[in-house]
Image (cartoon, helix red, strand yellow):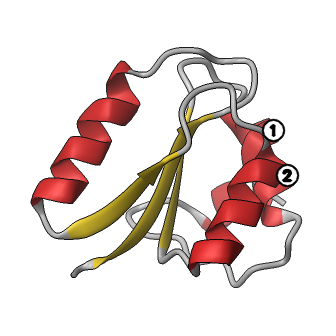
Amino acid sequence: MAGVVVLGTTKGDIHEIGKQLVGTLLSANGFRVYDLGADVSGEEFAAKALELRADIVGVLRLTDNLRCAARKLSSRRWKKRTYGRKSRSWSEALR
């Protein structure tokens, strides 16, 4: 198993196509994926991630209100890791 992933579409959004595609790709590559569905609060993401000791939390959103959901999720003061070519100011903006 490659890891445990918690996926969901954040509160206020009911779009699931992207989440389903991501979940399928992760599952096909050995991840154990837990799909919380659509319209999921930051608190629900955090609770499930802690319960499952998730390696990855995937919060999907069609609009750019994702930053608000990321703030709620990061309020748990988990160790933050930023992957890819994102700047330090980008990751600090999520706080």
The residue under the point 78% across, 39% down is 41
The residue under the point 54% across, 40% down is 8
Residue 3 x %, y %: 33, 78
Residue 47 x %, y %: 76, 63
For the residue labelled by badge 1, is the local secondary structure a helix, a strand or a loop? Answer: helix
Query: Viewed as shown, does residue 59 lie left or right of 12?
Result: left
Q: How many marks?
A: 2
Query: Viewed as shown, does residue 59 lie left or right of 34?
Result: right
Please indicate, yes or no, whether residue 71 appears anywhere in the rendered image: no
Q: Check the image and report above or below for 51 versus 95.
A: below
Q: Check the image and report above or below for 75 versus 50.
A: above
For the residue labelled by badge 2, is the local secondary structure a helix, a strand or a loop? Answer: helix
The residue under the point 36% across, 58% down is 33
Query: Type of residue at label 1?
Result: Cys
Mark 2 vs 1: CB contact within 8 A = yes
Instruction: Report the residue that reaches farthest toward the left.
Output: 28
Q: Which mark is residue 32?
A: none
The residue under the point 74% across, 28% down is 11
Q: Quadrant of residue 30?
A: bottom left
Which residue corresponds to mark 2?
72
Which residue corresponds to mark 1?
68
Q: Quadrant of the N terminus?
A: bottom left
From mark 2 to mark 1, how far is it between C-alphas?
7 Å
